[in-house]
Image (tube, coloured by chain):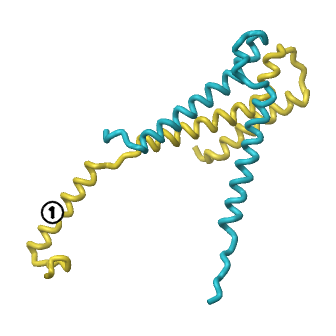
Amino acid sequence: MAIPKLYQWLLAASIFMAAWLSYVAGFFQTNLRQEYHNIILVLPIYLLMAFASYSLALLGYRVATFNDCIDAAEELQEDVKEARKDLERIGYKYASDWQ
Amino acid sequence: MPGFGMDQAVGWSFVSLAGFIFTYYTIWVIVLPFVEPDQPIHNFFLPRFYAIAGPLVAGVVALALIGAFIIYVSMPKKVKKS
């Protein structure tokens, strides 16, 4: 899709807030029960809290499952050794080997 | 999987904290209006006013701290005269 994700979210938030504000300001008449009315009144803050909890959980999950990539590190060390052998074979001298 | 280190403990505690906050707030805001006011579950929750005021105050404080931090970081450093 060509529309950036930011604009999609902004559009959805604007539509939701427009509907919510028109309800709170009383632009249309409803005969909802008092309980539903109370819930709708706090709905934006509830969504904000849900987003905050999701962000915190995602942060914690990524921290908990952050990898050290031990296999990749070992493979890289093997590659370094191999390259070193190959270079020594064709007469390359390392500064660290000089005594 | 590598051993259970400090990072894993911190990460999973963040996840549990987020889950607890979400569950508690959902019960407070969505479920509690449908429970009769004389039920004992109401003893575990503050009045509904704080369900709105708490996050608002926390958000204002957080934004103020972030703004103060940004101002502090982006201020030009004083050049020492030697």
Q: Residue furthest bottom?
A: B82
Looking at the figure, which quarter contains the N terminus of chain B? top left
Residue A9 relative to residue B4: left or right: right
Task: Judge whether A10 appears above or below A23 on screen.
Answer: below
Where in the figure is residue B59, as x and y percent of width and height?
73, 44
Q: Return the residue nearer the eye: A22 or A68.
A: A68
Characterize the local packing of mark 1: few (<14), some (14-19) or many (20 or more) Cα atoms within 10 angstroms.
few
Q: What amino acid does circle 1 point to?
A: Glu
The residue at 74%/53% (across/down) is B64
- Secondary element at tag 1: helix
Q: Return the residue nearer the eye: A24 or B43.
A: B43
Residue B27 appears in which quarter of the rendering? top right
Where in the figure is residue A69, as x and y percent of width and height?
32, 49
The residue at 71%/21% (across/down) is B30
The residue at 87%/18% (across/down) is A30
Q: Which residue is mark 1?
A: A82
Where in the figure is residue A15, as x and y percent of width and height?
76, 35
The residue at 84%/33% (across/down) is A21
Colour used to depict chain A in the structure image: yellow
Q: Which chain is cyan?
A: B
Q: Return the residue nearer the eye: A32 or B81.
A: B81
Task: Judge whether A4 appears above or below A80 on screen.
Answer: above
Q: How many marks?
A: 1
Chain to which mark 1 belongs = A
Where in the figure is residue B77, as x and y percent of width and height?
66, 75
Looking at the figure, which quarter contains the C terminus of chain B? bottom right
Residue B61 relative to residue A79: left or right: right
